[in-house]
């Protein structure tokens, strides 16, 4: 099993070539990625301002892995608490509470966040630790306004599925009301993407700001 911390240390290691530190960040994302691997990477390019040319700001990789690490520490604490709670209930002879299923145990293809996997540009704009805190609060039964995932309170978007409607969050495309047929439908990206382009940060400039010419070029 790949472990997070040694790869986090590699991202920090200034003696390593930048491409190796960058791939260590990817390995960290295979272990923990709250928005899914590709969308979480895309999020980090923006939040940590990872430039298109890594040499322009090597510290951006450190900022990215630290944001991820901070969120993972929060998540680990909550996941351990949850596991302990399940064990205690099992001991007491009660069935483990399966509803609501904690957010980290939901599968993406049946979850309301499927769009983040089918369009890596769609995900909450929250910093990852904030997202984890928000999801944990909802799991604890706190009633938060706006989209459960990102808190967006703008009017929702309705997309036709040909035989019904899906109601989505305007910000992160979280499914607020699923199609009445009961199926989870594919989310069609507004801008066609290729992962290689995201990985090479075609959407970013060297100053760490979004590339104003993307995706035209
Ligand atoms: Zn949202
Ligand atoms: Zn349908």
Image (cartoon, rainbow, N blue to C red):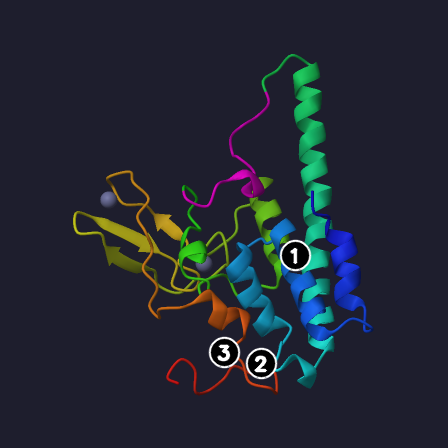
Residue 185 x %, y %: 30, 48
- Quarter assignment of residue 7: bottom right
Q: Are marks 2 and 3 in contact (CB under 8 Å)?
A: yes
Q: Residues within 10 Å of mark 2 (few under 14, many from 20)?
A: many
**What residue is shown with label 2?**
52
SS category of the residue bearing label 2 = loop
Residue 42 is left or right of residue 25, and the answer is left
**Label 2, ligand 1: CB separation under 8 Å:** no
- Secondary structure under tag 1 reads helix
Q: Which residues fall within the magenta stretch? A: 96-109
Tag 3's secondary structure? Answer: loop
**Residue 32 visible in the snapshot:** no
Residues under labels 3 and 1: Cα distance? 21 Å
Instruction: Please report whichever mark, 2 or 3, sits nearer to the chain's N-terminal start.
Output: 2
In the displayed structure, does residue 39 sit left or right of residue 87?
left
Q: Residue 120 or 2: which is nearer the viewer?
A: 2
Quarter holding residue 12: bottom right
Viewer-closest of 108 and 24: 24
Does residue 139 sit above or below 154 in this rendering? above
Quadrant in the picture for residue 91: top right
Q: Which quadrant contains ligand 2?
A: top left
- List the single residue furthest toward the top: 93
Task: Indicate which disc residue 202 carries.
Answer: 3
Residue that appears at 52% across and 46% down: 143
Tell me if mark 3 has few (under 14), some (14-19) or many (20+) residues whose alpha carbon lies within 10 angstroms of its own. Answer: some
- Could you give the CA–CA distance between mark 1 and mark 2, rounded to whole angstroms? 19 Å
| Residue on which disc 1 sits | 27
Q: Position of residue 140 (x, y in %)?
A: 60, 40
154 to 83, vertically: above or below: below
- Whole-angstrom CA distance, mark 2 to mark 3, is 6 Å
């Amino acid at each position: 099993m790949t472990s997070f911390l040694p790869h986090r240390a590699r991202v920090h290691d200034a003696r390593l070539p930048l491409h190796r530190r960058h791939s260590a960040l990817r390995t960290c994302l295979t272990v923990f990625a709250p928005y899914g691997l590709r969308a979480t990477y895309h999020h980090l390019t923006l939040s940590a301002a990872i430039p298109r040319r890594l040499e322009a700001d090597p510290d951006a990789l450190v900022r990215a892995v630290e944001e991820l690490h901070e969120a993972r520490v929060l998540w680990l604490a909550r996941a351990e608490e949850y596991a302990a709670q399940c064990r205690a209930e099992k001991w007491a002879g009660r069935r483990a509470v399966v509803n609501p299923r904690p957010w980290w145990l939901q599968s993406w293809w049946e979850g309301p966040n499927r769009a983040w996997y089918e369009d890596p540009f769609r995900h909450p704009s929250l910093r990852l630790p904030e997202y984890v805190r928000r999801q944990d609060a909802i799991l604890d039964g706190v009633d938060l306004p706006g989209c459960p995932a990102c808190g967006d309170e703008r009017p929702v978007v309705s997309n036709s599925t040909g035989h019904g409607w899906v109601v989505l969050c305007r910000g992160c495309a979280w499914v607020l009301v699923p199609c009445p047929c009961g199926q989870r439908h594919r989310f069609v990206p507004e801008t066609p993407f290729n992962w290689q382009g995201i990985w090479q940060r075609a959407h970013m400039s060297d100053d760490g700001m979004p590339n104003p010419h993307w995706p035209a070029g």
